[in-house]
Amino acid sequence: MANTRHKGSGFAEADDAARTVGSQIRETAESFGEKAESAASTATEKAKGAASYVSDKAGQATEAVGCGMESLGGAIREHTPHSGMLGNASECVASKLESAGQYLEQEGLQGLGQDVTNLIRRNPIPALLVGVGLGFLMARMGRR
């Protein structure tokens, strides 16, 4: 009987040790989960901040390009002949540059993206063909 008690107390000690280890593992897992959640939250906030920064910079660059296009249109208008075939062509180019520059300044990349999306929706087959053509050209250029 003494032998039976000894085995029983050994099982109780092992059971207590297993419960203690299980409790420690659970606490460690919970702590790890909390730390992982905190790290993920921090990474998400940093990614949002970086995306916002990039978006702001892209908007500023788009506005600068638009302003430059308008300026170039004005310079073409000033420094080219005002009459004849060359005058008509330069006036047309200047007008298109100025209107495209104003469009970029006002609409930005988001407006440009929406317009391209709408154009593709209205003309899906030509858009698909243009995409295939561009892909073909890029593949040919990539081989060289």
Image (cartoon, rainbow, N blue to C red):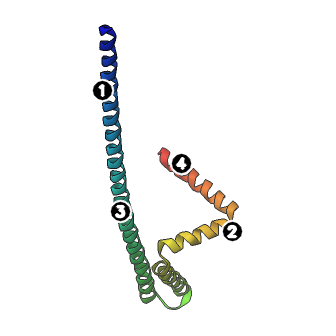
**x and y, in percent, of residue 9 in the image:** 31, 18
Q: Is residue 13 above or below residue 58?
A: above
Real-space CA distance between mark 4 and mark 1, rounded to the nearest whole angstrom: 65 Å
Q: Is residue 99 above or below residue 3?
A: below
**Disc nearer the start of the sequence (4/1):** 1
Q: Which residue is mark 1?
A: 17
Drawn side of residue 22 relative to residue 122, left or right: left
**x and y, in percent, of residue 83 in the image:** 53, 91
Label 1 amino acid? Ala
Label 4 amino acid? Ala
At label 4, counting other C-alpha atoms closer than 10 Å, the crowd grade (few under 14, some 14-19, many 20 or more) is few
Label 3 amino acid? Ala
**x and y, in percent, of residue 122 in the image:** 68, 68
**Disc nearer the start of the sequence (3/2):** 3
Q: Could you say whether the residue bearing mark 1 is in a helix, strand or loop?
A: helix
Q: Which mark is residue 122?
A: 2
Q: Could you say whether the residue bearing mark 3 is in a helix, strand or loop?
A: helix
Q: Which callout, 4 or 3, points to the residue nearer the camera?
A: 3
Q: Which callout, 3 or 2, points to the residue nearer the camera?
A: 3
Q: Which residue is mark 4?
A: 139
Label 2 amino acid? Arg
**Residue name at image x 30 percent, y 17 percent:** 10
